[in-house]
């Protein structure tokens, strides 16, 4: 790479585009292992292919493994920004396919003991990302926890992943019930049915959850889309390469592509106006004093 080209790339990467407010999306599930991390990275890649700038933020501390899928070994995480005054650009890694990645790692139990200066520095660093990306995708751990509920409340939108298995459907319903109980309203939750054996099975799964939510929680649960059971997903995981890159024509890649075509026009029209951005997200999370 010549000097002019690397300078151009540098400028492109660090150019701050004004007026952009990233949309913060929490990706979660009731049951573990239903495909959140794979969905997150491949959805991010499809958004990127559609011209959007995306950052994946890993908030799954217990089994943080999305970095393996992204081919990244993070040197630092957000705790280093908070405690060691590292710059946000030191933490931001570029993974496979050019997706940018931030490792979480903050224990907010320590936040009340931190100096105001450290918090101020952290917020200023986060502010730099406020106009940098279009989407921040938060990959979370499975199951209901106080942390997860607060993440959902602090983000602009939530994507709930389920599979057609009755246990996964029941656990998804439990998450939705908790969201409604704690927050009275649904804060824009959409459903993705993953690993469906057929289109019919996917439709039946989404209909079951939608009807149950409507009847018992008085909550609307729109479906973002379906991803079929596809052996290419497993093969790609083994290769440590997202399926959207290794098998762009496989069924799962096409399903994600369709979702983006359905999702993006709505985002452009109305959703971005309501985005709180990453700064808004952290302000809310910090005010609750929870761990990420
Ligand atoms: N559409 C699919 N078709 C086939 N296999 C799939 C599909 N989606 C996911 N899988 C399989 O499920 C495994 C788990 O996926 P993934 O790690 O994304 O789940 P997760 O919800 O992030 O798990 P955890 O709760 O542990 O974080 C993958 O390694 C892959 O083998
Ligand atoms: Mg995961």
Image (cartoon, helix red, strand yellow):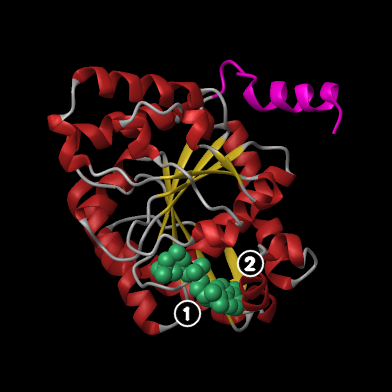
**Label 2: few (<14), some (14–19) or many (≥20) C-alpha neighbours in 10 Å:** some
Q: Looking at the rendering, which quadrant does residue 113 occupy? A: top left
Depth check, mark 2 against mark 1: the one in front is 2
Q: Nearer the viewer, residue 279 or 58?
A: 58
Residue drawn 57% across the image and 53% down it: 72
Indicate whether 239 appears above or below 123: below
| Residue displayed at 50% across by 32% down | 90
Vertically, is 21 above or below 95?
above
Q: Quadrant of the N terminus?
A: top right
Q: Secondary structure at mark 1?
A: loop
Q: Which residue is mark 1?
A: 164
Horizontal and vertical percent position of residue 137: 49, 46
Residue 160 % position (x, y) = 43, 60
Some atom of ligand 1 lies within 8 Å of the CB belonging to the residue at label 2: no
Label 1 neighbour load within 10 Å: few <14, some 14-19, many 20+: many
Residue 26 lies within the magenta run? no
> Residue 226, image x and y in percent?
59, 67
Residue 13: mark in rendering:
none
Residues rendered magenta in the picture:
1-20
């Amino acid at each position: 790479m010549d000097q002019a080209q690397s300078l151009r790339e540098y400028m492109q990467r660090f150019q701050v585009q004004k007026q952009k407010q990233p949309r913060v999306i929490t990706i979660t599930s009731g049951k573990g292992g239903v495909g959140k991390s794979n969905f997150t990275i491949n959805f991010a890649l499809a958004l990127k292919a559609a011209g959007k700038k995306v950052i994946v933020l890993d908030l799954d501390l217990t089994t943080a493994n999305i970095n393996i899928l992204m081919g990244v070994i993070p040197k630092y995480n957000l705790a280093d920004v908070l405690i060691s005054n590292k710059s946000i650009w030191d933490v931001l890694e570029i993974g496979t396919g050019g997706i940018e990645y931030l490792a979480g790692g903050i224990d907010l139990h320590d936040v009340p003991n931190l100096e105001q200066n450290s918090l101020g520095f952290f917020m200023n660093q986060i502010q730099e990302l406020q106009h940098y990306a279009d989407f921040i995708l938060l990959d979370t751990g499975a199951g209901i926890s106080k942390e997860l509920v607060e993440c959902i409340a602090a983000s602009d939108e939530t994507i709930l992943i389920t599979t057609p298995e009755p246990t996964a459907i029941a656990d998804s319903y439990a998450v939705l019930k908790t969201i409604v109980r704690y927050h009275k309203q649904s804060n824009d939750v959409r459903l993705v049915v993953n690993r469906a054996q057929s289109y019919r099975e996917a439709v039946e799964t989404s209909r079951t959850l939608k009807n149950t939510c409507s009847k018992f929680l008085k909550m609307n649960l729109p479906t973002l889309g379906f991803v079929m059971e596809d052996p290419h997903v497993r093969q790609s995981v083994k290769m440590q390469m997202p399926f959207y890159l290794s098998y762009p024509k496989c069924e799962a890649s096409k399903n994600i592509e369709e979702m983006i075509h359905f999702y993006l026009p709505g985002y452009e029209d109305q959703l971005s106006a309501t985005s709180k951005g990453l700064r808004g997200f952290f302000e809310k999370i910090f005010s609750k004093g929870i761990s990420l």
